[in-house]
Amino acid sequence: MISATAVNDADNLLDLQSVTKAYKLETKQFLAVKDIDLHIKPGEFVCLLGPSGCGKSTLLRIIAGLNAATSGVVSYHGQPLKGVNPYTTIVFQTFALYPWLTVQENVEIALKARGVPADARTNRALKLIDTVGLDGFESAYPRELSGGMRQKVGFARAMAVEPELLCLDEPFSALDVLSAEALRGELMELWLKKKIPTKAILMVTHNIEEAVLMADRIVIMGKDPGHIVTEIAVTLHQPRQRKDTAFQSLVDKV
């Protein structure tokens, strides 16, 4: 007989069970995160919220398979993850674009790495460039773009491989206030209207209002070592208004 827990786990997109990451520093050992349990279901927008140094970005890298956990189990669709997770991509806080490539070439490069034929690469890249609002800038180089536009290229490149789980590592923190607000709104529109193929989003942030504005669930982390303090469900309807009493009340609670 299959237990209810096993069925629920199989329904999850991602499962982290007792995940710990330790680094050796000369004669000492540094625990980045310890005993992390995290579950993400399809359709969720989850935020990892916590102070700098609590291991949020470390967890993203473990989930993407860029770093291996020291102990614990990372499962995707119920199967233990080995190596790089092919169903996940990360958008970093720095723009991480190749300066010698055009906007279109930067978006296409992820598809090229996966062996997608040239015609299909071009069609998918052009469609995504249009989706993120950069139509007409296909031939521009990163140095010719504003910070917000460069980060849009980062989003387009991450979405080009149609990830089931889109990981965002403080993607708005390097932008000015107005650009960040505009890009948040555009991402939420794409997500809520299902204009992107992504099944779930996991975003790292230390901005409380940003988490309450965007997430369905906020996972609050503490440090020394990184651990999960609590989780808070956000049941406010989208689009959310910062001046609403319920919004401000939840910000205060977080």
Image (spheres, rainbow, N blue to C red):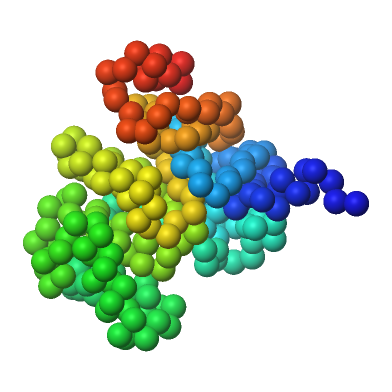
Rendered image quadrant of residue 185: top left
Q: Does residue 142 lie above or below 233 as drawn?
A: below
Where does the image place residue 63, in percent across and percent down from the top left? Answer: 55, 53
Where does the image place residue 180, in percent across and percent down from the top left? Answer: 23, 40
The answer to whether residue 176 is left or right of residue 88 is left
The answer to whether residue 193 is left or right of residue 134 is right
Q: Does residue 107 lie above or below 43 as drawn?
A: below
Res 25 visible: no
- Which of 75/238 is in front? 238
Rendered image quadrant of residue 67: bottom right
- Residue drawn at x 51%, y 47% is 43
Q: Which quadrant holds the C terminus?
A: top left
Q: Does residue 243 lie above or below 54 as drawn?
A: above
Res 4 visible: yes
Q: Does residue 115 lie above or below 236 as drawn?
A: below
Where does the image place residue 121, in percent across and percent down from the top left? Answer: 32, 79
